Amino acid sequence: MTGTEPAAARIDTSKPHPARVYDWYLGGKDNYPVDEELGRQIMGVDGTAKHVAQTNRWFMQRVTRWMAREAGIRQYLDIGTGIPTEPNLHQIAQTAAPESRVVYTDNDPIVLTHASALLRSTPEGATDYIQADVRAPARILEQARKTLDFTRPVSLSLVALTHFLSDDDRPYDLVKELVDALPSGSHLVLSQLTADLDPAAVMRGVQMYSAGGVTLAPRTHAEVTRFFDGLQLVEPGVVQLTQWHPELAVGESVNEDAVISLYGAVARKP
């Protein structure tokens, strides 16, 4: 595991952090009053926010089952991991294929304090954690190569991450740099906030995040699809999260008709 500086000393509790707000939405305990305050404010204008967060988590779980069972993927690079919840990506992947290798990455120091939960691998597989920001893709790739074999396919997960990148962060260039480093047969998994479906509620959320010092950049269907340029989209393409293979759900009720302001998709690198 990388990162040796004491994590607690670097946790900034004066302003909300997306990973901790997300943890509050999911009913976790690893958040601070400033995170709960923002979460409650957003719930005040969008009562579906908690359900959206849970739906995004379920999307990750369904995709991981598909990767392990249908695509035969045995290596995973998950950037923007967030605070661990059960079941985590490596638990799903290693249940299907115990030899799976998983590298998690996040930039919130509080996630580092829970890295031991992310490192509970099967004996046959491996897990690692990198303390890094997606804006430093070269560092992530360098560290990930210590655990993953980049001559074999990798599933790159950017789940509910890119909407925290402004256009000034060059999100398309960052995703391309990561994908370019992966071999043929690798897959990109991405979910992203959109204002296409409920613009008023989403834009109020954007304003609240901005007031808390957090960037939130919703993107249109066309803009989300652009992340997959040069890749082969897996059916059904870029869709609301509930519409991505609901038959793979285990233990959750997927309402395909619900309005969820997140698009998601999976694509294969030729």
Image: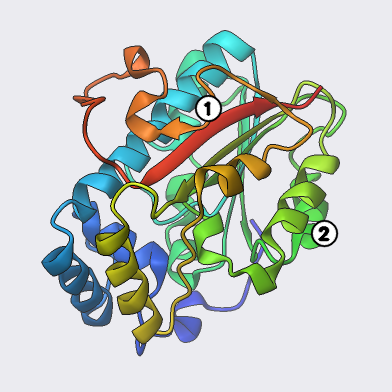
Which residue corresponds to the image point at 61% horizontal and 39% vertical from the top-left? Answer: 225
Residue that badge 2 annotates: 138
User: Crowding at label 1, few (<14), some or many (≥20) Cα neighbours within 10 Å?
Assistant: some
When the figure is inspected, residue 154 is found, relative to residue 212, above or below; the finding is above
- The x and y percentages for residue 22 are 32, 59
Name the one closer to the observer, 26 or 235. 235
- The x and y percentages for residue 82 are 44, 55
Q: Please indicate whether residue 127 sits to the left or right of residue 139 in the image.
A: left
Q: Amino acid at mark 1?
A: Thr
Which mark's residue is nearer the viewer, 2 or 1?
2
Residue that badge 1 annotates: 122
Which residue corresponds to the image point at 35% horizontal and 86% vertical from the top-left? Answer: 211
Q: CA distance from mark 2 to mark 1?
A: 28 Å
- The x and y percentages for residue 88 are 41, 38
When the figure is inspected, residue 156 is found, relative to residue 23, above or below; the finding is above
Dot 2: element: helix
Name the one closer to the observer, 151 or 42. 42
Tell me, yes or no, if residue 208 can be seen here: yes
